[in-house]
Amino acid sequence: MKQVIKINVNDIAKSIETELIDIRRDFHMNPEISYEEVRTTERIKEILESLNIKIVDIGLETGVVGLLETGKPGPTIAIRGDIDALPIQEANEVSYKSRVKGVSHACGHDIHLTSVIGAAIILSKMKDKLCGNVKFLFQPLEERNQGAKKMIELGALENPKVDAIFGLHNQPDIPAGKIGLKFDTALMAAVDRIEIIVEGVSAHGSLPHRSIDTITIASYIVTALQTIVSRNVNPQEAAVVSICKFNAGNTYNVIADRAELLGTVRSFNPELREAMPQIIEKLVFNVAESMGAKAHVNYYRECPLVISTGKYADIAKSAASKICGPDGVIDPTPSTGGEDFAWFLEKVPGCFFWLGVGNKDKGIIHPWHSTKFDADESSLAVGSAVLAQCVIDSIN
């Protein structure tokens, strides 16, 4: 007969709330972008070691795998938090503002990793009441959509084998104290990346008729790409095609012979996702050819859909209800944002949910990747408690 664990996780979470805020602010003030999360990694290790949580070396340059072993047979449950920041200058004037010029936690990964640390503190305090193992995955490179796959390849889900995994992402559109969770349908979109190269002929800026002007041609391509969603996608479905970087030319009086476009494609329909490369290539090639240029398209699959299914989605909903109350769990509108946590869900069952961090009264309303992004810090105890409760209920 399995032992039913009876403990008020909320009480523990509230008792460590001040500690969690201090931890979050330390990470917030010292953000590190992908591939450079060195201080973040060392600080996480220090905290886990202080909790007598084993550090598992799987060959990561940055990022951490922690293992809480109970010494009793049972499942291995993993919880994950990403750790990298963005190359964005923070505009908030707060005491804990980023001290690193041009870098900030504008996507709230400091909230995520602190929530996992909070869950580690809670679970370490009740280790004698647990069985099996808990893995704490502090993942690097999420903003590059490479960290989850790297951790999987290095064996983060093995030795011991992970039976289920949980993760969260902050959501400023949801009030602090609430959890957003979807069942069997996507919470976040599939993510692909496109690179478009346009090749033409350079000439003096005063002699445009002697050139094949790649800036003009690429501009037409950018405009034409917007017709894909409006004319190739069912209006009842959601999709995004965005060009986010445009490089061409070296000086003011030479017409550029090469232009490079970088962008992202987001979709929810697997059939549409499969068709997108051909749709984009046909449009790009035809526009370029009609204006005398050549074009090349490189299309990269980055992240699958984020979909939580089965009993672990039910467990997460139940856990969130215990922490936030029955009205604290909402069915949110899916986001065209993506998350490489989807790769974990392709390997093991689990659930990924949104942690509400918004607070209109405090002016905490700004979206991910904004220079003014911030989070209501009361969400830290909530995120920690929900993750810990997910582990406990999975063991039960």
Image: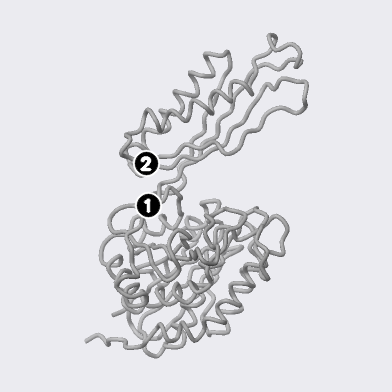
Q: Amino acid at mark 1?
A: Pro
85 or 11, nearer to the observer: 11
Extreme-bottom residue of the structure: 128
**Residue 40 horizontal/vertical position (percent):** 63, 68
**Residue 308 horizontal/vertical position (percent):** 32, 59
**Residue 112 horizontal/vertical position (percent):** 51, 67
Task: Say what secondary structure mark 2 lies in.
Answer: loop
Q: Is residue 77 above or below residue 103?
A: below
Pointer 2: residues within 10 angstroms few (<14), some, or many (20+)? some
Task: Say what secondary structure mark 1 lies in.
Answer: loop
The numbered mark, 2 or 1, whose residue comes first in the sequence reads 2
Residue 176 marker: none
Which quadrant does the N terminus fall into? bottom left
Residue identifier under label 2: 238
Tell me: 260 left or right of 161: right
Residue under the image location 43 percent in, 32 percent down: 277
Q: Is residue 391 visible?
A: no
Residue under the image location 40 percent in, 48 percent down: 189
For the residues labelled 2 and 1, the Cα–Cα distance comes to 10 Å
Residue identifier under label 1: 334
